[in-house]
Image (tube, rainbow, N blue to C red):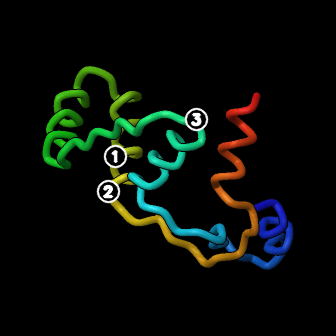
Amino acid sequence: MARAAIAAFGTGKTEVEVGGPEIFTYSEIGALAFAVLGKTPRISRIPAWIVNAALLALRPISRRQYTTFAFLARMMQNDMIAASTGTHRLQDTFRTRAAR
């Protein structure tokens, strides 16, 4: 990501697509994290309508928490696929962090 940022510096680009060598679903990312830890995956799914209803309830209580959770919810409801430019594999990153 740093290389892509440096390469884009001074080009006038306001966005740079940077992706890794692999494409995962959110469930696959979770399963990979559990696999690296040697644990059985325990992944829950919450329907979007429940998340959106909870966000509506949260909004008048805490605007700051609402905006944070709304951002995360929108990210999780959309695919985030960019051009494959990286060489680092997610499994290797998880292994490095798990070893700490």
Q: Which residue is tagged 2?
A: 77
**Nearer the viewer's eye, disc 2 or disc 3?**
3
Q: Is residue 12 above or below residue 80?
A: below
Mark positioned earlier in the residue sequence (1 or 3): 3
Q: Which residue is tagged 3?
A: 37
**CA separation in Å, label 1 and label 3:** 26 Å
| Residue drawn 20% across the image and 49% down it | 48
In-image side of 39 versus 14 (left or right)? left
**C-beta proximity under 8 Å, tags 1 and 2:** yes
| Residue drawn 45% across the image and 45% down it | 30
Of the 4 image quadrants, the one containing the C terminus is top right
Dot 2 amino acid type: Gln
**C-beta proximity under 8 Å, tags 1 and 3:** no
Q: Is residue 44 visible?
A: yes
Mark positioned earlier in the residue sequence (2 or 3): 3
| Residue drawn 75% across the image and 41% down it | 96
**Nearer the viewer's eye, disc 1 or disc 3?**
3
**C-beta proximity under 8 Å, tags 2 and 3:** no
Dot 1 amino acid type: Ala
Dot 3 amino acid type: Leu
Pointer 3: residues within 10 angstroms few (<14), some, or many (20+)?
A: some
Pointer 1: residues within 10 angstroms few (<14), some, or many (20+)?
A: some
Q: Is residue 77 above or below residue 99?
A: below
Q: Position of residue 44 (x, y in %)?
A: 28, 39
